[in-house]
Image (cartoon, grey):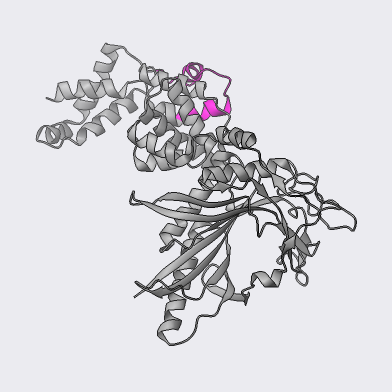
Amino acid sequence: MYEMVIGLEVHVQLKTRSKVFAPEAVTFGERPNSYVSWVSLGYPGTLPVLNKACVEAAVRLGLALNCEIASTFFFSRKNYFYPDLPKGYQITQEAAPIARKGQILLRLPDGSRYPVGIERIQLEEDTGKSLHDQDPFDTLLDYNRAGIGLVEIVSEPDMRTAQQAMSYLAHIRRTVRFLGISDGNMEEGSLRCDANISVRPLGSDTFGTRVEIKNLNSISALGRALEYEYQRQVELLRAGQPVLRETRTWDGNVTVPLREKETADDYRYFPEPDLPPVVISTEWLGELQASIPELPDRLFDRLVTEYGLTSEDAVLLTEDRPYAEYFLALLAEGVSPKSAASWMNGPIRAYLNETASSMERFPLPPHRLVQLIQLIEQRKVSLSAAREKVFPHLVAHPNLHPVEIAQEMNLLLLHDENQLEAWISEILSENPDKVEIYRKGKAGLLGFFVGQVVKRSGGKADPKEVQRRLVEKLA
């Protein structure tokens, strides 16, 4: 029997207005090579200037991951030649990272918690982007991304299953979103992951030969790549063949050799001569600590223990901060936790998915949704009509009051007892066979009768009142 030994290197692209050492704006999806400067392109005589906002983001992340923050740190040059690195070196941290020795508790799908250590967090600059599929003959280069601030989070080799690694990456993504330092979108490259994996006999305390896997563009891809690479290495060892120390890439189905694994000596690290050491004062560190919001795992526990929500609902509500804040705003307006979660993870999530939108762009302010929920509670509009008809119209016209929409769409419930009684009598008289079957014990037919009465009323009958009266009449 063999076990996996996994460590992850996660790169988080920082959501700052300008790059980490250069003045141009941070963008995504713009015309190639339109957001570049002499600094990013490495023109002779240009000098880097450190962006304080990037340092702030890195420190806040280090605090959120329970790391020790360096009182003084400095930058290094990592020297290598590649077309997407126009300067011929990357400004990064090697000897003196911004944070070290953290630890997080992963929340696994079965509800258990698993500790993973954080070796280091370092601040560096991103490279440009190589485009291999835009031209039939040449690789094209887009330097818009060159110089954008990156935080690299290096875990300890503490994970032993693909599921633990997937949970770790999801934890990092949730954390950076709650901190507001990155959108964490793997499909856009603002969060990227490299996995280091080795295998060893179960019970051994000696590490095997480590292989790095690149091009992992989703959490599910990480899991599939680790499972494949584990099987590949185990098969080699069982056949008496060595596992080579190399870098491989994931093509969606298998890992493919990319190059031999580099060592620190290959990069010829030395202190960056154009940037002085950075000192973090105790006062500023205290301010940054105070600025950290309630983090997703703490909020998850509160949603389950204090508000009685299911783990499934709590997971969805803690995926990103704007989504969680909207939920909490509903609670502050007096909506019950279960009702608020039902609306958030039902109609609102469906709208966001259908429109490929984010919570920040959701047009309906919380108080408008509260007004709609109140109409349901006051039995002026049915839940189904509110969700299926009023809500979509309200999202399109958020300045309208929900009751105006319900009136315009003729959806206000009718509370005329005589009319309700007449509709019920009509449905029962039209379905004598089903009435008999119900009275013989098939209670599930009650839903049929309720549905028929509501349909006969054109949606004006209150389903709860219809059900109460039907139970009385069919007794």
Residue 284 in the image: above or below residue 205: above
**Residue at 34% in and 22% down:** 457
Image x and y of residue 82, in percent: 75, 68
Residue in the foreground of this view, choosing between 231 and 415? 231
Residue in the foreground of this view, choosing between 256 and 45? 45
Image x and y of residue 353, in percent: 52, 43
Span shown in magenta: 389-412
**Residue 251 in sight in this render:** no
Residue in the foreground of this view, choosing between 314 and 76? 76
Residue 296 in the image: above or below residue 233: above
Seen as rendered, the residue at the extreme bottom is 240
Say which quadrant the N terminus sits in: bottom left
Image x and y of residue 377, in percent: 36, 19
Q: Viewed as shown, does residue 58 lie left or right of 229?
A: right
Seen as rendered, the residue at the extreme right is 45
Magenta stretch: helix, strand or loop mostly: helix
**Residue 357 in sight in this render:** yes
**Residue at 50% in and 54% down:** 169
In the rendered image, residue 465 lying in the magenta stretch gets the answer no
Say which quadrant the C terminus sits in: top left
Image x and y of residue 271, in percent: 74, 59
Q: How many labels sit on residues?
A: 0
Q: Viewed as shown, does residue 360 lie left or right of 38?
A: left
